[in-house]
């Protein structure tokens, strides 16, 4: 029979992931501290629970997509948390982005209650998540990956088993570091094009077909050019992930000059627009500094 899942954290990303499970015929029980987020999933066919514990007890396995490791820990191991509801032999699939040390520690907490953890952070942004085409980066036991692969494939077009718990966090933090560097590089490129008197739509297309292209340029530069900046990913989350990258750099003794600079620019972005502004607003910060 198909595995059943509790889904906790129905925000910009989690809402789409949960909807993909339903669209593919999975039965899910949801919880979020925001009633409006729960309501959206109920209209799609999810069942609501009063706590993570209740959702987990009903489903037998749990998926989380939450904004910080502290919140993941509270939802996992706090009062009314998943570990109060999951049966022994149940699984916790953590889809939030964590640092390596954080997910290893949380998985250890879960295993003390007889719950196995699969880390499954995703990459590609909310627009790909909305159509079930995001990429999953997986860390954990291969048999556990196999067991939950149908659910992962309902949400994600591709998945990569990277190694044991913690290994997916490493690659996820690396790919986000690259994405933030690319975003600032693409923004600077567009500013140069504008100051150089070029048509920006034509510049966008020319770069997309050139050696300067990147996934970030293709998917985010349009949001900058149309002024919406609506990427569905906030400055706070960018700073969280850059913090993990810089932490890893220190731990492993790898100098990250670009990421350090990018982190400082995002700090400035947060100070200017607030932590809940879209991360793409970082380009507006640069534009405003240069003047149009
Ligand atoms: P979000 O803030 O939009 O959503 C988080 C959800 O968790 C919200 O609905 C919030 O109400 C809920 N929540 C917070 N605390 C809670 C609690 N104690 N109990 C129950 N629910 C609680 O964040 P998001 O953009 O969906 O990101 C979630 C995670 O996914 C983060 O780790 C982020 O880094 C990662 N991620 C996001 C994206 C993206 O494009 N948004 C892409 C890849 C990875």
Image (cartoon, rainbow, N blue to C red):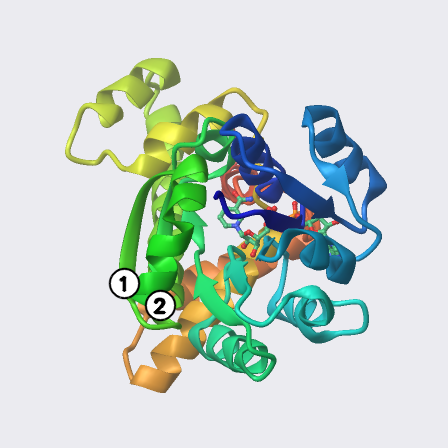
Q: Is residue 79 visible?
A: yes
The residues tagged by marks 2 and 1 sit, at their Cα atoms, a distance apart of 9 Å
Q: In front of the other: label 2 or label 1?
A: 1
Looking at the image, which residue is at 65% across and 65% down?
86
Residue 170 is situated, as x and y percent measured from the top left of the image, at 35, 68
Residue 112 is situated, as x and y percent measured from the top left of the image, at 57, 84
Residue where numbered disc 2 is placed: 170
User: For the view shown, which residue lies furthest in the left direction?
Assistant: 211
Residue where numbered disc 1 is placed: 162
Q: Please report whichever mark, 2 or 1, sits nearer to the chain's N-terminal start.
A: 1
Q: Total marks drawn? A: 2
Relative side of 141 to 79, left or right: left
Give the label on residue 119, or none: none
Relative side of 61 to 209, left or right: right
Looking at the image, which residue is at 24% across and 27% down?
207
Looking at the image, which residue is at 55% across and 72% down?
115
As helix, strand or loop, the secondary structure at mark 2 comes to helix
Relative side of 225 to 47, left or right: left
- The answer to which image quadrant residue 194 occupies is top left
Residue 105 is situated, as x and y percent measured from the top left of the image, at 52, 81
Identify whether 170 is placed above or below 247: above
Residue 48 is situated, as x and y percent measured from the top left of the image, at 78, 42
Mark 2 vs 1: CB contact within 8 A? yes
Q: Residues within 10 Å of mark 1 (few under 14, many from 20)?
A: some
Of 246 and 139, the residue lying toward us: 139
Of 34 and 209, the residue lying toward us: 34
As helix, strand or loop, the secondary structure at mark 1 comes to strand
Relative side of 169 to 32, left or right: left
Of 206 and 288, the residue lying toward us: 206
Q: Residues within 10 Å of mark 2 (few under 14, many from 20)?
A: many
């Amino acid at each position: 029979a198909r595995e059943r899942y509790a889904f906790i954290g129905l925000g910009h990303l989690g809402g789409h992931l949960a909807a993909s499970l339903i669209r593919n015929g999975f039965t899910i029980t949801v919880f979020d501290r925001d009633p409006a987020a729960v309501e959206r999933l109920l209209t799609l066919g999810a069942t609501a629970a009063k706590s993570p514990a209740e959702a987990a007890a009903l489903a037998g396995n749990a998926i989380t997509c939450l904004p910080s490791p502290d919140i993941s820990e509270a939802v996992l191991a706090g009062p009314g948390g998943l570990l109060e509801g999951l049966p022994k032999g149940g699984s916790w699939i953590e889809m939030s982005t964590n640092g390596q040390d954080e997910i290893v520690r949380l998985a250890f907490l879960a295993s003390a209650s007889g719950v196995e953890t699969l880390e499954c952070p995703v990459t590609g942004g909310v627009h790909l998540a909305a159509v079930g085409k995001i990429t999953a980066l997986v860390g954990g036991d291969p048999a556990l990956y196999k067991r939950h692969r149908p659910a992962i494939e309902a949400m994600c077009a591709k998945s990569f088993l990277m190694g044991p718990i913690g290994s997916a966090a490493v690659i996820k933090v690396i790919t986000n570091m690259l994405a933030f560097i690319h975003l600032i590089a693409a923004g600077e490129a567009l500013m140069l094009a504008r100051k150089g008197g070029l048509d920006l739509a034509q510049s966008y297309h020319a770069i997309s077909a050139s050696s300067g292209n990147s996934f970030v340029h293709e998917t985010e530069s349009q949001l900058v050019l149309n002024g919406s900046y609506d990427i569905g990913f906030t400055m706070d989350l960018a700073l969280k992930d850059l913090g993990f990258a810089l932490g890893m750099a220190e731990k492993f003794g790898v100098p990250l000059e670009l990421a350090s600079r990018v982190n400082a620019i995002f700090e400035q972005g947060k100070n200017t627009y607030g932590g809940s502004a879209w991360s793409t607003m970082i380009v507006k910060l640069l534009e405003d500094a240069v003047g149009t």
